[in-house]
Image (cartoon, helix red, strand yellow):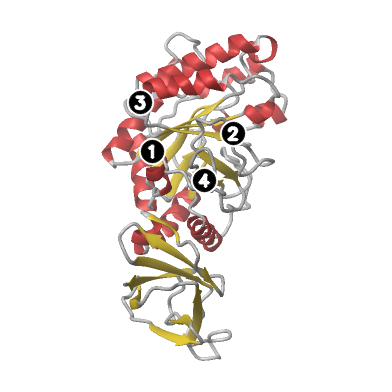
Amino acid sequence: MIPKPEKRIYDFERYGLGMFIHYGLYSIIGEGEWAQDFQKIPVDEYAKLADQFTAENFSGENFAKTAHDFGAKYITLTTRHHDGFSLYDTRGLNTFDAPHTPAKRDLIEDFVEGCQKYDIIPFFYHTTLDWRVPEFQNDFPAYQQYLRESIKILCTNYGKVGGFWFDGNWSKDADWEEDALYGLIRQYQPDAMIINNTGLTKQGETGHYEIDAVTFERGKPFPINKDGARKYLGSEVCQIFNAHWGRAKNDFGYRAVRDLIVELAECRKYGANFLLNVGPEADGSIRPIERGMLHEIGKWTKIFDEALHKVRPAEGVECDNDSFLLKADEPNTYYLFVPRLGIVGSPNVVKNPENLKKVNLHGFDKTIKEVKWIDNGENLNVINENGEKFVECTQYAYGTNLVVRVAKIIAE
């Protein structure tokens, strides 16, 4: 038997798309979020970067508008990364935070206000490891208390939080006192998602009972076996544009918009959310190339918005030609995702032109009333052969390539 999802997990699965933001002192260096560790920069020397931290163009409103136009329903922002620097007012826990820099403000407060304006759900990334606090190495129980006090600040000063995204338990084989940490969140933010990233090496692994979703960092999602599980879990893929999470000024290895659209579609195939990262400039602004890529992907998500949210995998249906079917929450409504369609045109202009692609809906036992492309409303033919249903998918007109095209199916 598959357990019933708790409401926060049910809602999370239907967000579909989120925006990740890695921003901190490492953004000033511009060599990735692990610059302090990989370059072996002493703690005291690294801390001097705080004197240059102005965050003059950091704007929660701009982030939220960008996410909204991109088609994201939530933003996960690094409130504190592994270097121990906090974007929020730590209220006396230490002075290694944004209000004690030339920025002189609580950036998380600004972020949450921006999210509220654009109806974006704020998620808080927070490290569980710390390169700065000595107790992390020599008095772990004391460090755990410090961590909980930090999380309590986030729980009690910024209104309703959509979720907490932890990262770092993979760094140490120790008692992370998860009962106490997650219990604190359930006390102050009972509706918040709890996610604890298992990293590159343990993708899709489950953990403590209070964790609400598994992670696939920079990986491919796969179905989570929910039958007989002690709890229904959501899932999420977090991905980057190039090879770094934080700003890396000399990383030119940007991926193709086409590939990111395919990955987003693959995530929805398995019911996973797609969390795509930006690494802002030192001043807090989004890099022009990343803003441009978000804009282009946003054009695609705007066309197919209805098929990305409030949907789930269609159980028992297998499609050929790398296509797949999602079932909408509304009755008898389905969405057929079709990649790699050809373009109609002269063979002197179009390579291997095609006019039609048949997709077999193996196991789909409902009567189909209508199938049409979402992007242009064109009706598609359904044929029955040897007890199987096929959708005849027309190709793109010259001048168009949507990478993954979606048809809406109305059944009865």
Circles 1 and 2: CB atoms closer than 8 Å: no
In which quadrant is the C terminus drawn?
bottom left
The label nearer to you, 4 versus 1, is 1
Q: CA distance from mark 1 to mark 2?
A: 18 Å
The label nearer to you, 3 versus 2, is 2
Q: Secondary structure at mark 4?
A: strand
Check disc 4 and report the residue beneath it: 236
Type of amino acid at the residue the image marks with label 3: Glu
Q: CA distance from mark 3 to mark 1?
A: 23 Å
Type of amino acid at the residue the image marks with label 1: Arg
Which mark is on residue 207? 2
Mark closer to the chain start, 3 or 1: 1
Mark closer to the chain start, 4 or 2: 2
Mark closer to the chain start, 3 or 2: 3
Q: CA distance from mark 4 to mark 1?
A: 14 Å
Q: Residues within 10 Å of mark 3 (few under 14, many from 20)?
A: some
Type of amino acid at the residue the image marks with label 4: Glu
Q: CA distance from mark 4 to mark 2?
A: 15 Å
Type of amino acid at the residue the image marks with label 2: Gly
Q: Secondary structure at mark 3?
A: helix
Image coordinates of residue 9 in percent, x first then y, are 42, 41
The label nearer to you, 4 versus 3, is 4
In the rendered image, the vertical position of residue 49 relative to residue 77, given as above or below = above
Between 104 and 37, which is closer to the camera in this rendering? 37
Q: CA distance from mark 4 to mark 3?
A: 26 Å
Q: Is residue 234 left or right of residue 109?
A: right
Circles 4 and 2: CB atoms closer than 8 Å: no
Circles 3 and 1: CB atoms closer than 8 Å: no
Check disc 3 and report the residue beneath it: 109
Circles 3 and 2: CB atoms closer than 8 Å: no
Mark closer to the chain start, 1 or 2: 1
